[in-house]
Structures are given as structure tokens and as C-alpha cells.
Image (cartoon, grey):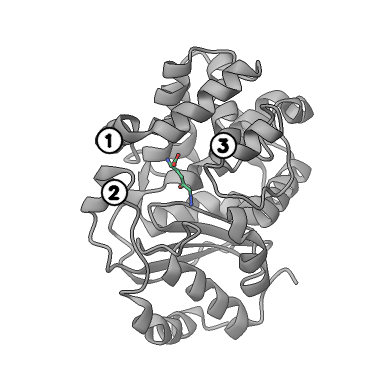
Amino acid sequence: MNYKHILSEIAAEIEPLRTVGRQADYIPALAKVNPDRFGICITTTHGDVIEWGDVDERFSIQSVTKVFTLSMALSIMGERLWERVGKEPSGAAFNSLIQLELDRGVPRNPFINAGAIVVADVLMTQLANPEADYLDFVRKIACDDTIDYDREVAASEREKGYINAAIANMLKYYGNLENDIEEVLHFYFLQCSVEMNCRQLSRAFLPFADRHSEFSFGNVRLTSSQVKRINAVMQTCGFYNDAGEYSYLVGLPGKSGVGGGIGAVYPGRYAVATWSPRLNEKGNSVMGMKALELLTTYTRESIF
Ligand code: DON
């Protein structure tokens, strides 16, 4: 498969979308990013790296981080994790408060904000040094020790993070938050602030594509079956109320973030990351989703 050629064709085809959509500005620091960017990088299970566009620039991975926090929590808690958070698609906005109330404080899945805040709480209870341990895991899975939190983005989100604060308060009310609300929010915002470029993000997703290699990064170990299940949650819940549309168009387990990044996997073959900050109204990257749609169309490679 000539991925290089396919990526250049895709890039030309999606060029008219470069100014379509709006970057997230409810996190003030994200509004400073140049929105007219696009990068895509494929890392194959054979170790080939094929890239196009703005693949060197780092961006805030935001909700893509939820795949890594889920991996850590699942490795520690196993199936008991699902007593605290569900695994059903939400069909609602990523920051829905109404749904959390209807579900009496048990978030639908770990990829909506409420679910990820519960996962952050689990990690705080279980880890000796949550901030350091999480960063260490992310660095290991991406094979890059330069990856770091962007504390300015985290602080900026905390300053305006009224809805997440409301979510955390509601979780506490329903008895689904063990730690101090402020401390959990601080850790959650830090996780979201992790910066990577497309090359690093596609590398970090590779272990989810390659179920024949051992998933073992420091203390974080998952069985091949657990990796399969994380992919299943990505497929059904990774794009919130756009998950059906994303599945229909793309057909690869994936996870988006409001920084404009998407990580996705074609099991057995490759991991792919895209980055373009302009989002659709559901909070998912316009160019990124279109690029992935064309990738699975032109290669005829998808899970369906
Ligand atoms: O909590 C938030 O609102 C952000 N830190 C992350 C949300 C996000 O990335 C949703 N993704 N599309």
C-alpha cells in the first residue's frame, strides 16, 4: 500500500476545508493556536512512519488523553473499574451535565468528561504520584521523554472550567468521587494539557493497533483482550454525539480532542494521528475526520 501517495492525495482533496469550522476557545489558551493547520502521520506495526503536513508542531491532546488514562485505570482495576463508570455510548455532548444527573452520578463511559473525571479520581486513589506516574506512562507509550504537560493550558482551563467543576460536584454528591474536588480537577486538567505532535501521537496509539505485541509500559500492563476492549470503547464512544457519524464515515476505533487531534487505529496494521484545530459543532476536527474518511475509502482498509 502506497500510503505516502494516498496521504498527498487526501491532503489535496481536503485543502478547501482548511478554514471550515472553529477552534475551541472555551479554554482561552487554545484560542491562541493558529487554526489553519493540518498534519497526519501513520505509524505501521512494521515501524514505518508516513507523514504529511504539520506533523512537528505540538498541540494539546485534550480528550485524546482519555485513552491513556483509561488504559492505566483498567490495568490497575480490571473489570472493577466498570462499577464506577459505564461503557455505553452517550449520544450527548462531551460535557453533558443533564445526562449525569439522569444517570445518578455514574457516567455513561470513560471518554466523556464526567467519566474521565471519575477515572482521574481512581488514579489519584491508586497511584503514589499520580502526576508523575501518568506523565511517565505517556512518555513510555509514545517512546519520547520530551513529552510534557502544558501547565499554562491546564491553568487556563481551570480558570474557565465551570462545567467540569459542576460535573465534579455532581459526582461528589452522588458518592462517585473519593478525592477532593479541586485536586481531582487539577489532575484532570493536567492530563488534558499533555502536548504531542502527530508523529508522537500516532506512535502512542500503535500499541492499541498491535495486539500481538505485549502491552507493557512500566507498571501499566494490559492483556490483548483488554486492548481489544479499549478499541471497542473508542469505536462506540470516542466521538461523543458524533460517534455514529464517525463510525459510518471512517470505520476505525479512534478518539478526538478539542485541541483538534485525533488518534485512531487500524488493528493489525497501523496507528494514525491527525491534527487540525478547526472543529465541527460536536467538537471534533473537521479536516481530521475528513482525512480519516478518505484514508479508509482510498485504502479500502477499515474494520468494517
Ligand atoms: O474537559 C474539557 O472540556 C477538555 N479538557 C477536553 C474536552 C475534549 O477534548 C472533548 N473532545 N472532543
Q: Residues within 10 Å of mark 2 (few under 14, many from 20)?
A: many
Q: Residue 229: horizontal and vertical position, in percent?
A: 74, 46
| Residue 268 appears in the rendering | yes
Name the residue: 59% across, 23% down: 171
On screen, residue 261 versus residue 293, left or right, reads: left
Q: CA distance from mark 2 to mark 3?
A: 23 Å
* Residue type (three-letter) at the residue carrying disc 3: Leu
Task: Give the mark, 2 or 1, whose residue is nearer the N terminus.
Answer: 2
User: Viewer-proximal residue, 115 or 162?
Assistant: 162
**Residue at the image point whose x is 64% and y is 56% from the top:** 209
Per the model, the C-alpha gap separating discs 3 and 1 is 21 Å
Q: Position of residue 75 (x, y in %)?
A: 67, 30
Instruction: Locate residue 86: give its quadrant.
Output: top right
Q: Residue at x 31, y 40 (%)?
A: 146
Task: Say whether mark 1 is within 8 Å of ligand 1.
Answer: no
246 lies left or right of 25: right
* Residue at the spot of label 1: 156
Mark 3 sits on what residue?
Answer: 97
User: Which circle, 3 or 1, is nearer the viewer?
Assistant: 3
Residue 149 can be seen in this image:
no
As helix, strand or loop, the secondary structure at mark 3 comes to loop
Residue displayed at 61% across by 56% down? 241
Callouts 2 and 1 close, C-beta under 8 Å: yes
Label 2: which residue?
30
Tell me which amino acid carries mark 2: Leu
Q: Is residue 76 above or below residue 304?
A: above
Quadrant containing ligand 1 reads: top left
